[in-house]
Image (cartoon, grey):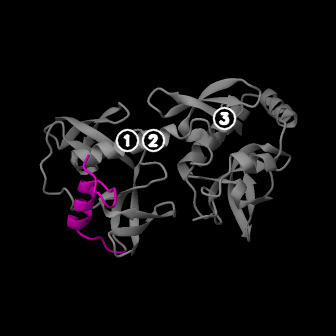
Amino acid sequence: MVLDAETGIPEYVRTARLLLPKVSPGQEVLARWSQDGWYHRSSVVHSCGDQSYFLQSKEGALARVWREDIITEGDDSSQEVKEEDPIIGAHPLYPERYCPGVVLTITGDLQVKVRYYDGTEALVFREQIFLIPAQKFERDVAYLLECEERWVGQPVVARRDHTATFHPAEVLRRVGNGKQYRIRWVDGTSVVQDREWIFGKWSWSRALTVGDYVLAPIRHSPLTFLPGVVQGTSGTVLHIQFINGKSCQPEETHHCFWLSEEQFSTAAQHYNSQRQRGTVEEEDEDKEGQGEEGSEEELDESVYSSDSSTSSL
């Protein structure tokens, strides 16, 4: 990779910033977010005048993104797709998220078969993929793997599947294609958990408001977290209705993790399913919460980060 001697920026990046057309406030685009390395549907909020832009995600988060990490509908509309072309495409397992892949075959019904960077293969429509330069593909894949690896060694809050509640843990290592991790609970036992149900320093964050879905500690057991809905706000304090039916309880915004509507719905369904299995799990959950050592203050020093506070955006 050729780097500019003065700035250290790859030459193809400098060229892209010079040649790619500008985007305008209000324009809908696809953009790579540094938080997780994936491409998300976003809208342009402001041009910084140097080919970087402030964008807003569908969830309301804001970020500054450079033009080479922004894709518009017109960027590849006139280009022909061929086998082995590097692309950014919609991932079949993660709705409305896009990532690097390679075209394997082209069918006659406006579909292409793609192998994504994580090994997943799927048929997608032509309008769901965007051609990118080979250097861009390599750079994006490298950053995605870096984002996945940086969770290793981190203190987190993760779901115990058998109780459907969330508790402190530590990430030990990536498993398989990087979408799962082996985590260790405070009692020393370990399990494999999907990345979607692990929260910590690198989790998505946004300013929280009424109606938002969150993962928050329950008051009687601060090391047990449950999903809930923000019912009201007062400064940095949130009033939350949890999925277990408990009444609203005030909670500081920096103690909460933002959840997408899909995450909340899935978590609530799993919680209700576990509760229907009987009262044994309910009683075990209470005992587990009472037996946990530590406090919210300890979580402040580990799981939470000022860089990922839900009130920072």
Q: Position of residue 284 (x, y in %)?
A: 82, 29
Task: Inspect the image, locate mark 3, and give the three-letter code of the amino acid beneath it.
Answer: Glu
Residue at screen point 43% across, 55% down: 33
- Residue 119 at x, y percent in the picture: 35, 30
Question: Where does label 2 land, which residue?
Answer: 146
The answer to whether residue 51 is seen in the rendering is yes
For the residues labelled 3 and 1, the Cα–Cα distance comes to: 24 Å
Q: Is residue 266 magenta?
A: no
In front: mark 3 or mark 1?
1
Mark 1 is on which residue type? Ala
Magenta residues? 1-25
Disc 1 marks which residue? Answer: 142
Q: Residues within 10 Å of mark 1 (few under 14, many from 20)?
A: few
In the rendered image, the residue lying farthest to the front is 5
Q: Quadrant of the C terminus?
A: bottom right
Horizontally, is 296 left or right of 129 in the view?
A: right
**Residue holding disc 3:** 170
Report whether 193 appears left or right of 105.
right
Asked where in the image residue 11 lies, by quadrant, the reply is bottom left
State yes or no: discs 2 and 1 in contact (Cβ < 8 Å).
Answer: yes
